[in-house]
Image: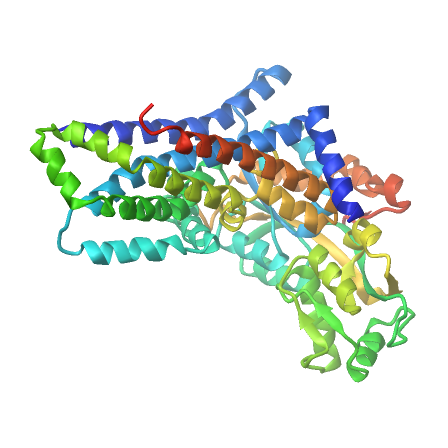
Amino acid sequence: MLKKRYFAALFAFMLLILSACGNSQTKEADAKTKKAEPKAAPTEMILATTTSTQDSGLLDVLIPMFEKENNVKVKTIAVGTGQALEMGTKGEADVLLVHAPAAEKAVVDAGDAINYKRVMYNDFVLVGPKENPAGVSGDDIQAAFKKLAETKSIFISRGDDSGTDKKEKGIWTLLNIKPAGEWYVSTGQGMGQTLQVAAEKKGYVLTDRATWLAQSKNLSDMQIVVEGGKDLMNIYHVMQVNPEKHDKINSKDAKKFVEFMIDPKTQDVIENFGKKEYGQSLFIKYTE
Amino acid sequence: MELLIDGLKKAIEMIFSGDPEVFAITWLTLRVCLISILISTLIGLPLGLFLGLTSFKGRRLLLLFINIGMGLPPVVAGLWITMFLWRSGPLGDFSLLYTPTAIVMAQILVSLPIVTSLTCSAFQQIDEKMLLQIKALGATRLQSLMILLKQSKIAIMAAIMAGFGRVIAEVGAAMMVGGNIQGDTRILTTSIVMEVSKGNFDIALALSFILLTAALLITAALTFLQQRKRFS
């Protein structure tokens, strides 16, 4: 008897807590928006994106702008490009901001993503130890990779199917080299951690410029050795997840987000981002 | 070493400057951890009591699973919960993924086995003669329950502390089911991971000091409760 009542009370209590936990968040959000504009509760939109946009701090600037303009709560999930695209094909995200054109094309062709728009670019750079034991330089990334493989210089790979990882694997494939052996280290981690591993192991690593600039203060023994080649361009695209393929997709806000990203005003914010801190743009506007 | 001192300085600075974001992250961390350990205790304590004092068919098997659960890696718990909460998953209609509730669920999953199993062993250790004596003295069921709880208070508190240690240290599952969303599901452990990947070691260290302080204060409070004179 007592036990039964106890469990009933326990169950009720648990429900109360769980609901309180969920609600308090929306209440806070309500309160915030009420101050600004007495509108309905904000809708929620999931943005799956790559770690570089978050780690560089760009999203901390763009997302609040978008949220304020459109009364949306954006849930940013920063993962590797591979996982972000997978979230899109599974319908677990509403909008994607990624940087692996070849892999993106497959997703768009399969009809999983629509409203595919080019947004911005920065570039990949090859970073290596200051002593530069392999003696690579210039702007020819293929020649540099070839030399690294021949001299078996330590190379640190992301190995996590991210946009940068896809780029690196693509170069090896072009060269018909299957990198393997003790000199080729695969971390399976994000760009920041991979750069730190490279610094510890005195290895070479392919990275996007934004993450390199943000991290270089911790990597005093490393420097850019190869940069500027045409095939080192790192292009970001934004796209909506196809609402016809999955339920529960918030396509209304996703569409607004795509428009927001290619809007000239937003593009200026992108281009000016990081100029003050690093003396150069981390991302450069590049719409179609 | 210099970094360590810088981190400590930064932590003190963050606490006293009243940075609203750091405050919000710490508050969310405490809220999520305390709620999950509370629910784990409310379920695990009666369950452990039941398993410790009774015997029935399949009890050992159940206990085995609970003991295996003590070693359940948080990322595994996180992965399972993610799959259940996906839009395409069985609980997709509630849209709970990437909410604090999802983190609470994952933390309950990893701490419940610890609380249950340790409580169960506490009650199993109670001398059978004492149980007989309580019965012989004509105690009601509620009275005997209270005596047993008092007897095993120290072990029960230890179980709760072990569970709390698990949830406050947890990062893998919170990252997966919470998504480390700013102002929503960002807790201390996930923001430490993020700051490290951003290369902001000083901020990461500062946050780790805040996390340690919070853990210390709560564990100290629990230890105080545990060590209070038994029959005061």
Residue located at (78% from left, 53% from top): A121
Q: Judge from the rendering whether residue B222 lies leftward or rightward of residue A112; answer left or right.
A: left
Quadrant location of the C terminus of chain B? top left
Residue A161 at x, y = what percent? 62, 64
Above or below, comparing residue A58 to residue A197 in the picture: above
Q: Judge from the rendering whether residue A211 lies leftward or rightward of residue A19; answer left or right.
A: right
Above or below, comparing residue B18 to residue A257 in the picture: above
Residue B213 at x, y = what percent? 60, 35
Q: In which quarter of the image is residue A153?
A: bottom right
- Front one among A155 and B210: B210
Residue A162 at x, y = what percent? 64, 60
Q: Quadrant of residue A253?
A: top right
Residue located at (69% from left, 49% from top): B196
Whether residue A226 can be seen here: no
Whether residue A170 can be seen here: yes
Residue located at (89% from left, 47% from top): A280
Residue located at (65% from left, 31% from top): B22
Circle count: 0
- Front one among A255 and B76: B76
Residue B193 at x, y = what percent? 63, 48
